[in-house]
Amino acid sequence: MENVNEFIALHQERFGAKPALFRAPGRVNLIGEHTDYAEGFVFPAAIDLTTTVAITPRTDGQAVLYSANFEKEARVDLATLPSRGTGQWEDYPLGVLAMLRQAGIEVPAFSLSITGNVPLGAGLSSSASIEVATALALLHLTGKSWSGPEIAKLCQKAENHYVGAPVGIMDQFVSACGAEDHALLLDCRSLEYHLAPLPHEVEFVLINTMVKHAHADGAYKIRRAEVAEGTDILHQENPGIHALRDATLQDLEQVKSRMSDNVYRRCRHIISEDDRTVEAAAALDAGNLKKFGSLLVAAHASYRDDFEASCPEADILVELALERPECIGARLTGGGFGGCTLNLVPSKEAPAFAEALKKRYKEKTSIDADIYRCRASAGAHALNVK
Ligand code: GLA
């Protein structure tokens, strides 16, 4: 439901009161994949695909959730809120509620409606946008105001402990703290961040492979386990290494013989990706788009070959993109194993590029790709509607 007034009317009709509204964006990660839980750097931007929630208080001790996208309602008694999710859509908002309560915040009974246009399972962080929008709404109800980084940490916990997906902090952080026309370079260890202005002459064209992924399922968890195994071996050799953020490629070479080839290559991806991320942010700051684009391409190769988190469809899309001279850089973005490719293209040429890629992808795979031409947008905020 794209129209805010219709969404307000829907909530009011269902729950009998005029709601307060909150919005949080999805994100595109420009570079830095699987570096967040290695305490390294990521460089995402909030986008103008968003989740909006409407909230009103209740008096019956219940939390009632309505998804306008799924046209489904879920209802729980606050007194008997489960301590873990049940694998349903409502796990994301209920996880935020559970973590707020765990933090000692008494949340009164409420009705919450949710609507959004972040595609699900497309690597654009629909779940983080639901969590962050819900957090703003529930905090509003309690009269408290938390900082963006605090909200991000709460929502990451909801996803880790309630939903059961072992994700890092990136998605929730940029959804909470992103800024219009800026990408956000985040140090995932200190949570210090820098907002980097994005050049106006280029656009991010996101092409959905239409291959879906979910982080609570196998592949992401397996990668995390492989990375943990590699980190342990590095730590045994060099106690100063607590996370891959602390290791160099040289450190890795020294312990190569003690690791499986898979674990070695997973670590090589993260250590090299961390360097590429810092370099890419500096290249963008310096206005060097050519260098920035070439780092995106190198990141894709590393994600595909070392981390093995790409999929054939994404590789085809990246290959097709790089055949076109106007494409400055292309890579699979997000957690991997499906989702969207990010393509950096001069704005003037973006419509023709998008059309050509859609056609060529269909010819090669018979898949009809959805394409999103996104702008870097504001982080989470209240919506003031008259
Ligand atoms: C998902 C997770 C993030 C991050 C990326 C990979 O989006 O939610 O925490 O690990 O994958 O970069």
Image (tube, rainbow, N blue to C red):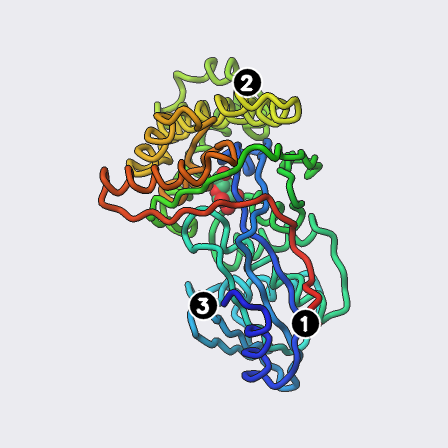
Going by the numbered disc 1, the residue's amino acid type is Ala
Please give the name of the residue rendered at 61% of the width and 35% of the height, measured from the top-left corner: 200
Mark in front: 1 vs 2: 1
What is the distance, in whole Å, between disc 1 and disc 2 at their CAs?
49 Å
* Mark 1 lies within 8 Å of ligand 1 (Cβ measured): no
Between 100 and 46, the one lying in front of the other is: 46
Amino acid type for the residue under numbered disc 3: Asn
Residue 49 percent coordinates (x, y) = 53, 53
Residue under pointer 3: 69
- Nearer-N-terminus badge (2/3): 3
Residue under the point 71% across and 64% down = 104
Query: In this image, 31 relative to 105: left or right?
Result: left
Instruction: Give the residue type at disc 2.
Output: Thr
Disc 2 target residue: 248
Q: Which residue is mark 1?
A: 20
Query: Which image quarter holds the C terminus?
Result: bottom right
- Label 1 to label 3: alpha-carbon separation: 19 Å
How many other residues sit within 10 Å of disc 3, few (<14), some (14-19) or many (≥20)? few
Rate crowding at label 1 as few (under 14), some (14 to 19) or many (20 or more) other CA atoms within 10 Å: some
State which tag comes first along the sequence, 1 or 2.
Answer: 1
Q: Position of residue 16 (x, y in %)?
A: 61, 86
Residue drawn at 48 percent across, 21 percent down: 294
Q: Determine whether label 2 and label 3 are within 8 Å by CB.
A: no
Which sits earlier in the primary sequence, circle 1 or circle 3? 1
